[in-house]
Amino acid sequence: RLVPAVAAKQAIEDFSLAAVGYQDYTRRLELEFADPLPASVVLVSSTAHYSWEKIVRALGIGSRRLVEVPVDRHARMDTGALEEIVTGLAEHRTPITAVVSVLGTTEEGAVDRLDEVVAVRDRVGSTLGVTFHLHGDACFGGYAAALTRATDGRRLGGPALRERSGTSWPSDGWVAGISALAEADSISIDPHKLGYIPYPAGVFLVRDRRSRNLVSLDPPYLSPAAGQSGEGFIGRWILEGSKPGAAAAAVWLSHRVVPLTVDGYGHLLERTAAGARRLHAALGVEGALGAFRAVRLPEPDLNVVCWVVTHPALTTLNEINRLNEAIHRRMSAVVGDREPAYWVSRTRHTAPGCDGIVLPLLDDLGVGREEWSTEGLVVLRSTVMDPFFIEGAPTPDHCTGLVAAIAAAAAASH
């Protein structure tokens, strides 16, 4: 009875996706069943990191098979639009390889309502017979999940967290979204971001450990000795095969010193998020920028604050963009012997992917949709990484200092 079992296992491996590849796998389906399927797609939020286009190119899927899902004014995936797109794909029998939900967008720090994405998958699964791999891109915001864990492992809800912070943050929706990482099929996290760990440190987690076999190979000169477990041999499970251990050691040590709980990393990230909310509020104070004014994106989900500086004399989007580019140049580079006391970064939002974010701002900016669709919008950004940014005296009040520096840069750039 052992031989048939071994033979069956070998047959499965010989005809597995890992062995034949997706192109030959699709071809054989067509030959065997005369029922070809269209090329599959990957759905991503329109604010997803640019590396997702690089990924589908590198995998041979093709950038044209990357479908963007619109976002709302908070830069979160519009789950209603997601369900409409999935329904349309199902009508054309187009397979969905994966849906990528972002927990901490690079530009805005926005946290998708991953719980609602999970609900969409459940609904289309029961009504349309459609399913897909759900990936949580938590490279930036994954560590924020520590805020929802008590020291005894219990999951903390919004009311308990708001009581701890003494503010209206985080909302119940934020907690539901970040907690739904537990429902994802795979997750990516970069400890060198909100983990405060030196670059490069990256983590890829999978719910079904069998999926590791897609890249699992044992080099004969490194594989474990007979009788030894191979679980600790990381080269078996990663694309690189081998890599330095310093980054992994740094992650391990940091997690031992600062635990992944509300009193460890959770407290650290709550303080930086509080600092970001303080900066967001300070930019909205009338007269904070003198004759200039900050048109802000909504209050941040994490610790990234985004805004656009404008002036009553600026009547076109091109003029507003040039002002913000000039402010960025003054606050992001050393010019001669002048080094900025405070640095900011910037990004450019473009149509139609960022319509949900920018269209609600146009009236406040005093410009129209036609300008937006052709010009795009330059947005200034600050990522608050200092947990003491929220504090005032006797510590240096960097929030007040940063707002004053923005006002000075605007005056000098106008």
Image: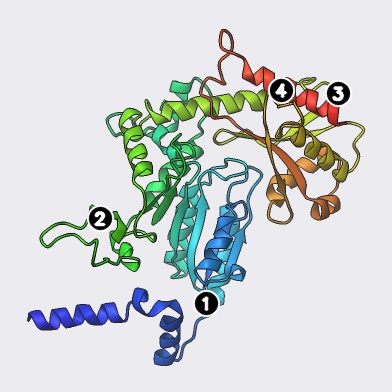
How far apart in space, not on screen, are marks 2 and 1 (Cα)? 41 Å
Query: Is residue 89 at all visible to an observer of this figure?
Result: yes
Amino acid type assigned to the residue bearing label 1 in the image: Arg
Horizontal and vertical percent for residue 248? 35, 43
Horizontal and vertical percent for residue 135? 45, 56
Position of 48 with respect to 352 (left or right) is: left
Which of labels 4 and 1 is toward the front? 4
325 relative to 163, above or below? below
Residue tagged by mark 1?
A: 93
Amino acid type assigned to the residue bearing label 2 in the image: Phe
Residue tagged by mark 3?
A: 291
- CB contact under 8 Å: marks 2 and 1: no
At horizontal 32% and vertical 38% (from top left) the residue drawn is: 252
- Residue in front for this viewpoint, 79 or 14: 14
Q: Is mark 1 on a helix, strand or loop?
A: loop
Decide which of tag 1 and tag 3 comes sooner along the chain.
1
- Residue in front for this viewpoint, 316 or 190: 190
Q: What element carries label 2?
A: loop
Task: Classify mark 2: residues with Cα within 10 Å, few (<14), some (14-19) or many (20+).
Answer: some
Residue tagged by mark 2?
A: 233
Any mark on residue 403, and which? Answer: 4
Decide which of tag 2 and tag 1 comes sooner along the chain.
1
Q: How many marks?
A: 4
- CB contact under 8 Å: marks 4 and 3: no
- Quadrant (top left/top right/bottom left/bottom right) for the N terminus: bottom left
Which of labels 4 and 3 is toward the front? 4
